[in-house]
Amino acid sequence: MSGRTCNPERPTTIGLIGLGLIGSAVAERLLAAGHTVIGFDVVEEARMKLSQLGGVRTATAQEVAQATDIVMLALPNDVISAKVLRDIDGSLRTGQILADLGTGNPRIAESLAAKLSERGVQFLDATISGSSAQVRRGDVLVMVGGEESAFGVTQRLFESFAWQVRHVGPSGQGAWMKLVTNLVLGLNRAALAEGLAFAESVGLDPADALAVLRDSMAYSRIMDTKGLKMVARDFTPEARLSQHLKDVRLIRAAAKRVGQALPLSDEHQRLLELAESLGLGGLDNSAIIEALRPSS
């Protein structure tokens, strides 16, 4: 599916804290759409890359918050997000919009939105369904929870890197919807990995098996994004395996609170933990197949 091109009438200055896999891809798309990106990351190499792309790097996260009215967070987890929010707390001001692009605990998103609202800061949980490679192609879905007024201001910015943007409800709903999509997406990926590992074990060429799967009723889009990586054993990270394990733990904890059984996700977590124990956590999440191959 081709990405949407955004040609805004009024280029915007955007703050971006977190310039890793997703953050750097978002920066590329925003810059290509004519926006100004002022960014920070704890890794100097990531800050330098932003400069090379045409963005403006800062020495601290506080400087990003001070210089921009719209700040996006692209951080690995809630713990890091909480630290960054403490760091920039004194720089936040009435009228700002803070959009968290990461996958986190929906209850934390709801709490943050309420606390920031008291200070006149609007918070959006603007979660991304897709990898960094898909962000670079503009081939992701953004699911946004929060006030409609803030969504209206930021929608065209999200469209710079997404083929579709949906406002899914009040604060926290974007994060909840992301967990739902990640549950199904992760199981699709695990099913593909198991199928290809099975094909190899019975003597089929995995590339042939993938081609047949893509033409069959078993098809899912995950075959387009992860199938060749599994076949070629190319696990250059687009979305890290440990990140998805973090998401599955969030999913299972939420399900436990409401009494929902998730037997497939229970097994999925076990498999991801095995993969992480094999040293695969920092690789692309397609590396889950290595935990299923006989050599493992």
Image (cartoon, helix red, strand yellow):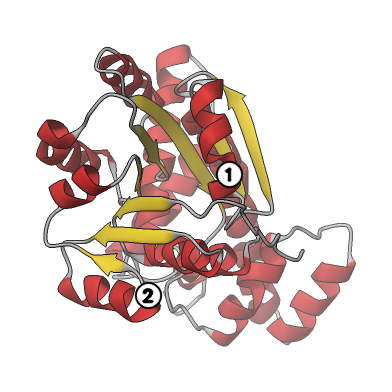
Mark 2 vs 1: CB contact within 8 A: no
115 lies left or right of 215: left
The residue labelled by disc 2 is 54
For badge 2, the amino acid type reads Gly
- Give the farthest residue toward the front: 10
Which residue is the extreme one toward the right? 216
Please say whether residue 79 is visible from this viewpoint.
Answer: yes
The residue nearer to you, when weighing 104 against 152, is 152
Quadrant where the N terminus is found in the figure? bottom right
Q: Is residue 288 visible?
A: no
Which corner quadrant of the image does residue 184 belong to? top right
Q: Give the percent coordinates (x, y) of residue 240.
A: 40, 63
Q: Amino acid at mark 1?
A: Val
- Between 131 and 60, the residue placed more toward the observer is 60
Residue at 23% across, 70% down: 47
Q: Tell me how far mark 2 sits from mark 1, CA to CA.
A: 24 Å
Name the residue tied to disc 1: 142
- Taking the spot 17% from the left edge, 68% from the top edge, the residue there is 43
Query: Image check: 219 left or right of 144?
Result: right
Q: Nearer the viewer, residue 249 or 37?
A: 37
Nearest to N terminus: mark 2 or mark 1: 2
**Residue at 22% from the left image edge and 44% from the top image edge:** 65
Q: Residue at x 11, y 40 (%)?
A: 87
Q: State left or right for residue 78 relative to residue 272.
A: left
The picture places residue 58, in percent across and down from the top left corner, at 18, 62
The quadrant holding residue 51 is: bottom left
Residue 103 vs residue 171, the one in the foreground: 171
Find residue 30 and report its horizontal and vertical position in percent: 49, 61
Assess disc 2: are there few (<14), some (14-19) or many (≥20) residues with their C-alpha within 10 Å of its C-alpha. some
Q: Position of residue 244 (x, y in %)?
A: 42, 51
